[in-house]
Image (cartoon, rainbow, N blue to C red):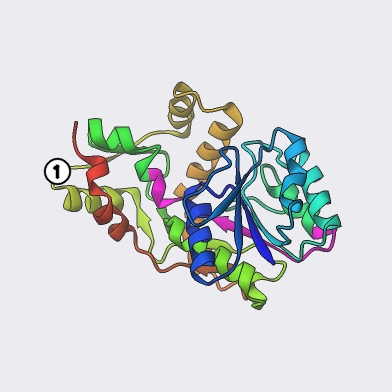
């Protein structure tokens, strides 16, 4: 039997594929590129081409578990539902989806997919990672390299920044075990430590050997900044709203709350290690 990873060339998907391969579990990567590094197998798959939805279930791949990263949509279920129906009809035994922190069942983005899997009575896990450590090498990259600053509307709010390694490890456990915390649950996926953006700026200052600051802006200014770089309005609104909630202490509340089995998964990979391993990315221009 085989695990299908839809979005297998993403950081999380590829790291999950490596974990499965190292555990001698057959894995198939599905993406719009249709290729994967040896010795992994890959097929062409496109969320916006429904004819590709059948491909994983052909050619004797024997798919019984799926890790699913959805399309970039504010209401992913409208695109993903036909594929879910095919997978359910084909006897998929376990679904693990990558949703987002504070995206509830039935909510926007992947919330509808979560709700549909629940309502159909499937065995599922909806992983809800908080802010990615990788954001510092993507959305914050140029600001750090050029202006020596991190811009946010999070104020003094602290975040348990999570690395993609930890998301992949949580997905691996959800796919390969029957632990209670991954059985029809939606755990927050968190890093092991809480940091404000001021803390992060100080950490980068130490690692990079030059002064990095946290520039505090209002939610309105943050939203405008997201829109100015071409981010779709629905995502700009969502990210700005989450930053504003972070400033109120929401992420701290999640980190410290004892919500019982399946409420949260705390990873082991530290943010400072990520900065030290990748510090050449933020070399000054």
**Quadrant in which residue 164 is drawn:** bottom left
Can you give x and y, in whole percent of width and height, for residue 23 in the image? 52, 72
Q: How many marks?
A: 1
Q: What crowding class fits label 1: few (fewer than 14 Cα within 10 Å), some (14-19), or many (20 or more)?
A: few
Foreground of the two, 56 or 120: 56
Q: Residue drawn 83% across and 57% down?
A: 90
- Direction from residue 135 to residue 66 in the image, left or right: right
Foreground of the two, 13 or 35: 35
**Quadrant in which residue 48 is drawn:** top right
Can you give x and y, in whole percent of width and height, for residue 273 in the image? 29, 60
Can you give x and y, in whole percent of width and height, for residue 81 in the image? 79, 45
Q: Which residue matches tag 1?
A: 210
Q: Residue drawn 41% across and 44% down?
A: 135
Q: Residue drawn 62% across and 68% down?
A: 174
Q: Is residue 17 depicted above or below 134 in this figure?
A: below
Q: Magenta region: which residues? A: 118-135
Say whether residue 166 is visible. Answer: yes
Foreground of the two, 145 or 194: 145
Q: Is residue 186 depicted above or below 239 in this figure?
A: below
Q: Which quadrant of the figure contains the C terminus?
A: top left
């Amino acid at each position: 039997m085989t695990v299908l990873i839809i979005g297998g060339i993403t950081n999380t998907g590829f790291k999950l594929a490596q974990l499965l391969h190292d555990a001698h579990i057959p894995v198939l990567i599905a993406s719009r590129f249709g290729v994967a590094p040896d010795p992994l197998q890959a097929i062409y798959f496109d969320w916006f081409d429904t004819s590709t939805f059948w491909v994983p279930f052909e050619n004797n791949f024997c798919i019984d578990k799926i890790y699913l990263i959805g399309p970039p949509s504010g209401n992913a279920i409208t695109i993903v539902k036909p594929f879910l129906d095919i997978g359910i009809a084909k006897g998929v035994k376990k679904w693990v989806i990558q949703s987002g922190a504070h995206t509830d069942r039935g909510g926007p983005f992947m919330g509808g997919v979560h709700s549909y899997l629940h309502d159909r009575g499937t065995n599922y896990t909806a992983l809800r990672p908080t802010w990615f450590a990788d954001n510092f090498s993507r959305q914050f990259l140029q600001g750090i390299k050029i202006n020596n600053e991190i811009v946010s509307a999070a104020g003094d709010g602290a975040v348990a920044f999570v690395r993609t390694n930890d998301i992949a490890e949580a997905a691996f456990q959800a796919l390969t075990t029957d632990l209670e915390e991954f059985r029809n649950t939606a755990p927050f996926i968190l890093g092991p430590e809480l940091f404000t953006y001021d803390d992060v700026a100080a950490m980068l200052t130490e690692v990079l050997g030059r002064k990095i600051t946290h520039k505090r802006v209002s939610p309105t200014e943050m939203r405008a900044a997201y829109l100015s770089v071409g981010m779709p309005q629905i995502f700009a609104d969502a990210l700005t709203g989450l930053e504003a909630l972070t400033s109120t202490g929401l992420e701290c509340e999640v980190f410290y709350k004892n919500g019982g089995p399946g409420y949260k998964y705390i990873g082991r990979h530290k943010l400072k290690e990520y900065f030290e391993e990748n510090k050449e990315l933020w070399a000054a221009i």
